[in-house]
Amino acid sequence: MSEINKKRRNLVIGTAVIGAGGLIVASYPFLDSLNPSARALARGGPVQIDISKIQPGQQITVAWREKPIWVLRRTPEMMRVLDSEEMRKKLRDPDSRVETQQPEYIPAPYRSIKDEYFVAIGLCTHLGCIPTFRPDIAPADLGESWQGGYFCPCHGSRYDFAGRVFKRVPAPTNLVIPPYHYIGESTIEVGVSPSDKTA
């Protein structure tokens, strides 16, 4: 092979390598634009919640997928109300038989992984209003039979401390329980089920 042909071959190879490198560098912004933005990740990604400072009877609210997530630390008295036969008779679905309202690993009747901590999406299942947390007993506006729970001010739907819907209200089903699991004793991760974490 002549000296000129060797130089020509090296020039072609060098040009091809530089061109390929340039193509990769030039296409990076386009490929990167296909990834979800930080804002999109924040809207749809899992959310970790520190529950160590929640006092008994207190509820906190955080955002996940632009929805309010409630974490209620239930008191022994709240649990007694949930267990009462009187309460069960008032509920439309006391055993949470509508499967789409909670993941399959969330047991009835408390609808929580750990009985003490209730985690739910804080949107009424009627038209998506945000119910108010009403732990007070027998307030004037809700009547003497009110034992505490959630009240939707939009159309009057009522739920107990496990998010189970009362009979004869507009809401058709219990509050929705999001997928979640515990990370240690004091952190809940909403948006990821235990099976997803171990897979």
Image (cartoon, helix red, strand yellow):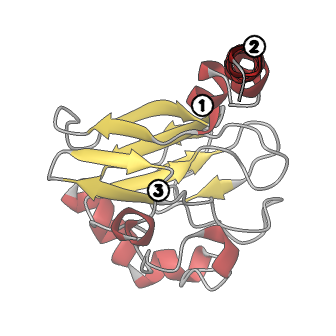
* Marks 2 & 1, CB-CB < 8 Å contact: no
Residue position marked by numbered label 3 in the rendering: 192
Q: Between residues 121 and 188, which one lies in front from this camera angle?
A: 188
Picture layout, residue 143 above or below residue 41: below
Picture layout, residue 155 above or below residue 194: above
Q: Left of 175 or right of it: where is 172? A: right
Per the model, the C-alpha gap separating discs 2 and 1 is: 56 Å
Per the model, the C-alpha gap separating discs 1 and 3 is: 14 Å
Q: Between residues 96 and 10, which one lies in front from this camera angle?
A: 10
Element class at badge 3: loop
Residue position marked by numbered label 2 in the rendering: 4
Q: Nearer the viewer, mark 2 or mark 3?
A: 2
Q: Left of 170 or right of it: where is 160? A: left
Q: Earlier in the sequence, mark 2 or mark 1?
A: 2
| Type of amino acid at the residue the image marks with label 3 | Val
Q: Nearer the viewer, mark 2 or mark 1?
A: 2
Q: Nearer the viewer, mark 1 or mark 3?
A: 1
Residue position marked by numbered label 1 in the rendering: 41
Q: Between residues 168 and 139, which one lies in front from this camera angle?
A: 168
